[in-house]
Image: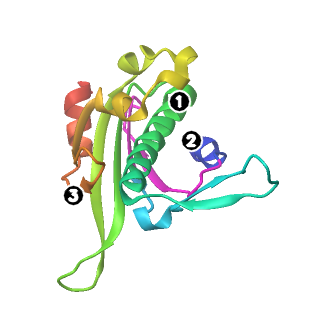
Amino acid sequence: MLDTYLGGIEWPTEPAIDFDIGDNNTTLALDIKFPNEDEISDKEWSVPATQYKLTPKKVSATKMKQIYRDYIHSIMMRVAGEIFAHLPSVEHVLISGYREVINSSNGHSEDQYIISAIMHRDQWASIDFARLRQIDPTEVVTSHILTRSMTKTGVFKEISPFSPSDLEERSGA
């Protein structure tokens, strides 16, 4: 069922999502493979006031990091929302995100976890979704149990994600 709901979302760059529901159906652990920063467009498009064409403008490196930061947290928020909206038995969810990087010591591709959060339905329900435009996805994710190493400019560093046993322990399941 969750596959159907997540598969119906039109993502700018589709993340790969794997999940495992707990034995008692109240917990769900989910991994999201995020795109790398260089897979996201570095152009902003606008329409000049006197012309009927799209004009590209290259985005600065700092702005790209902010866009990537917002994108990562927005994906996590959207996925959590879909879980809590469509799976009423799930009370606690673990969402961990990783990206594929090249190990500079051996040239092999590796998964690098950059964010991991445990979210609880009760806390999620306190969000005022009528004011969605005023909600900052980064702040939403930060307000839950979180492990993340990110600079103020939005540069993510590798972390050790929460495990399903951490989820079970923190959910009391």
Up-down relation of residue 57 to residue 8 (above or below)? below
Specify which label sits upstream in the sequence, 2 or 1.
Answer: 2
Q: Give how far apart the Cα atoms at labels 3 and 1 are.
A: 30 Å
| Percent coordinates x, y for residue 140 in the rendering | 37, 28
Identify the image quadrant of the C terminus.
Answer: top left
Name the one closer to the observer, 83 or 150.
150
Disc 1 marks a residue whose amino acid type is: Leu
Judge whether 45 appears above or below 162 on screen.
below
Looking at the image, the residue that sits furthest to the right is 52
**To which residue does mark 3 refer?**
158
Pick out the residue farthest to the bottom. Answer: 106
Badge 3 element: loop
Q: Which residue is mark 2?
A: 2
- Single out the mark in the foreground, 3 or 1: 3
Q: Which residue appears at 28% of the width and 63% of the height?
A: 112
Q: In terms of depth relative to the viewer, which is nearer, 125 or 152?
A: 152
Task: Name the side, left or right, on which 128 lies relative to 45.
Answer: left
Give the Cα separation between the discs numbered 2 and 1: 8 Å
Circle 2: element type? helix
Mark 3 packing: few (<14 Cα in 10 Å), some, or many (20+)?
some
Which of disc 3 and disc 2 is earlier in sequence?
Answer: 2
What residue is pinned by disc 1? 87
Residue 18 in picture, x, y percent from top left: 45, 53
